Image (spheres, rainbow, N blue to C red):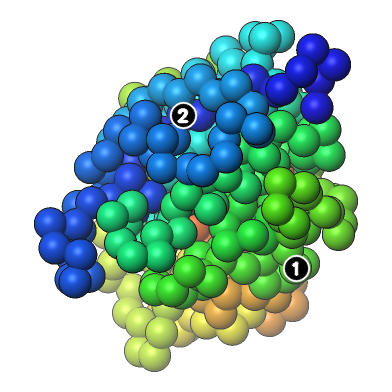
Amino acid sequence: MPERGLPVIAVLATGGTIAGAQDDTTSHAYRAGALGVDQLVAAVPGLAQLGDIRAEQVASVGSQNMTYAIWAQLAKRVDELCRDSSVDGIVVTHGTDTLEETAYFLSLVIRHDKPLVLVGAMRPATAPGADGPANLFHAIALAGCDEARGRGALVVMNEDIHYAREVQKVACAGVNAFASPNRGRAGVMRGAHAQFFSRNESVHSTASEFSLDTLSSDEWPRVDVIYAGVDLGDDLISFLASRARGLVLAGVGDGNATDLALQALQRASAQGVAVVRASRTGSGSVDRNVELDDDALGFVAAGELSPQKARILLTLGLLITSNPIQLQEIFDRY
Ligand code: SIN
């Protein structure tokens, strides 16, 4: 907590179920992003003891409709708030569907050590037992903690704290929908206090080479994800290879696919499309030259990154290089 008293926390709202409203509370149906940030903040008991809250609405979307244009706007505002010495921490409220993607993106492009916490909810704000107020309470408390400084973007859901690189939405329903399958959760909220279990070992924030300066929403390279399975053909890959700068394989097992699909990916790589192999399994590490000869095929191995996070890193990586060896170095670092 700062010497001058309660921390000043900026809350940037983007929509999602945390701001969702039902027409009928007996039904599962709701409209994501229907409530404004002031209503979200007003619903949290005890906030006045946690900090001085400055709330802003950045967007009001279901996070399935998150865009690079909103990311650019959000990242610019987060960056401004990081430079504002009167602000101690930042919270971003977000839909849970792509929360892990926005968190990872921000952890790569926000080059500051100020606490930055993303939070969502699985139940709409009007539901009995809505989880949004508790999650937002924890996010604001965490953003005001010195212990959250220098860890890159954090995600807090259901009392658990996660590092942006590790966190995944692992269930499409239920309040316990987030996990960090490879390395475990970063810590836990005990009331308004954070207890961390581990350091963030990945390269992030102040050590990142990515920057907002290089991003403009019109210029981001197109990267598509191919989902592998039994009898995957080559036509979709050939189609996308003529349009995308990069392809991520959500491969079976260790980032693998049918011979036909791999041949099409090899052709794509030979014509200059960056090809990254990730796994559809949800955990583990796709390592270079294990099941496949990445050196010969011109592929990049995603390591522990999920296909959706590999897509983000490849998009940012392609702003720097399209050389597969250099892209592999980027994947090995982040
Ligand atoms: C969304 O991602 O906006 C909808 C789902 C949710 O927030 O839980």
Image position of 200 with respect to 67: above or below: below
Residue 322, quarter of the rendered image: top right
Taking the view exactly as shown, the residue that stands out farthest to the bottom is: 230
Residue 293, quarter of the rendered image: bottom right
Residue 284, quarter of the rendered image: bottom right
Position of residue 69 measured from the top left corner of the image (x, y, whole percent) = 35, 28
Residue beneath the point at 33% across and 41% down: 15
How many numbered callouts? 2
Image position of 325 with respect to 26: above or below: above
Residue 139 falls left or right of residue 182: left
Residue 244 falls left or right of residue 333: left
Position of residue 310 measured from the top left corner of the image (x, y, whole percent) = 56, 55
Residue neighbourhood size for the residue with mark 1, other residues' Cα within 10 Å, grouped as few (<14), some (14–19), many (≥20): some
Quick one: label 2 or label 1, which is nearer the N terminus? 2
Question: Quick check: is the Cβ at mark 2 less than 8 Å away from ligand 1?
Answer: no
Residue type at mark 2 is Leu
Residue ID for mark 1: 184
Residue beneath the point at 66% across and 45% down: 154
Image position of 103 with respect to 174: above or below: above
- The answer to whether marks 2 and 1 mark residues whose Cβ atoms lie closer than 8 Å is no
Residue ID for mark 2: 12
Residue beneath the point at 46% across and 59% down: 131
Residue neighbourhood size for the residue with mark 2, other residues' Cα within 10 Å, grouped as few (<14), some (14–19), many (≥20): many
Residue type at mark 1 is Gly
Q: CA distance from mark 2 to mark 1?
A: 27 Å
Residue beneath the point at 63% across and 79% down: 254
